[in-house]
């Protein structure tokens, strides 16, 4: 293959593929839902989450030996336990980090959910109806508490 063809076709194609794979967060593993927070920094969002755990210690009531936070891709996985009536749910989430020009996007990605005590599976292995159910519970209890804390803090 001559050099001119490489420069005109192969290199741009490779660059495009690299950009696509870097920015496809959640593409292979997937996510249950993403919750975007506009006009704040990731640092402020993490502080609000920490404050929510202080206000609602029941969200942190889980086996910290089995579920170690801060492990995984990026700055790691985080966990939240939510009890609704007689049901006990467990959620894994992350703070995705994107390459430029999307590096200003601040969000929480719910990456797995299930019944507390059971193994958490990848989002791609959770049924669509369970994704909707888990997403609504996580948003109603945890995400709304984070949004309230952000409002209170401003």
Image (spheres, grey):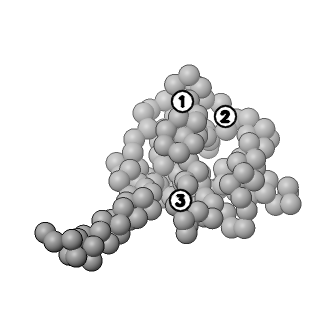
Is residue 7 visible to us here?
Answer: yes
Name which of mark 2 and mark 3 comes first in the sequence: 2
- Residue 48: x and y in percent read 75, 49
- Residue 123: x and y in percent read 41, 50
> Which residue lies most toward the front here?
3
| Label 3 Cα neighbours within 10 Å, binned few <14 / some 14-19 / many ≥20 | some
Q: From the viewer's perspective, is 154 left or right of 97?
A: right
Q: In front here: 79 or 89?
A: 79
- In the rendered view of the protein, which quadrant contains the C terminus? bottom right
Q: In front here: 129 or 46?
A: 46
Helix, strand or loop at label 3? It is loop
- Residue 127: x and y in percent read 37, 53
Q: Are marks 2 and 1 in contact (CB under 8 Å)?
A: no
Disc 2 target residue = 60
Disc 1 target residue = 67
Q: From the viewer's perspective, is 50 left or right of 133?
A: right
Helix, strand or loop at label 2? It is helix
């Amino acid at each position: 293959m001559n050099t001119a063809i490489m420069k005109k076709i192969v290199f741009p194609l490779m660059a495009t593929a690299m950009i696509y794979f870097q920015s496809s967060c959640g593409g292979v593993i997937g996510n249950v839902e993403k919750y975007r927070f506009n006009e704040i920094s990731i640092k402020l969002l993490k502080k609000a989450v920490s404050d929510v755990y202080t206000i609602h210690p029941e969200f942190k009531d889980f086996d910290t030996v089995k579920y170690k936070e801060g492990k995984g891709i990026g700055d790691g996985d985080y966990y939240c336990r939510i009890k609704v009536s007689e049901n006990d749910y467990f959620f894994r989430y992350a703070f995705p980090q994107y390459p430029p020009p999307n590096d200003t996007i601040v969000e929480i990605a719910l990456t797995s959910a299930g019944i507390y005590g059971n193994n958490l599976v990848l989002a791609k292995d959770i049924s669509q109806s369970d994704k909707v159910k888990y997403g609504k519970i996580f948003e109603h209890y945890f995400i709304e508490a984070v949004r309230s804390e952000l409002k209170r803090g401003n």
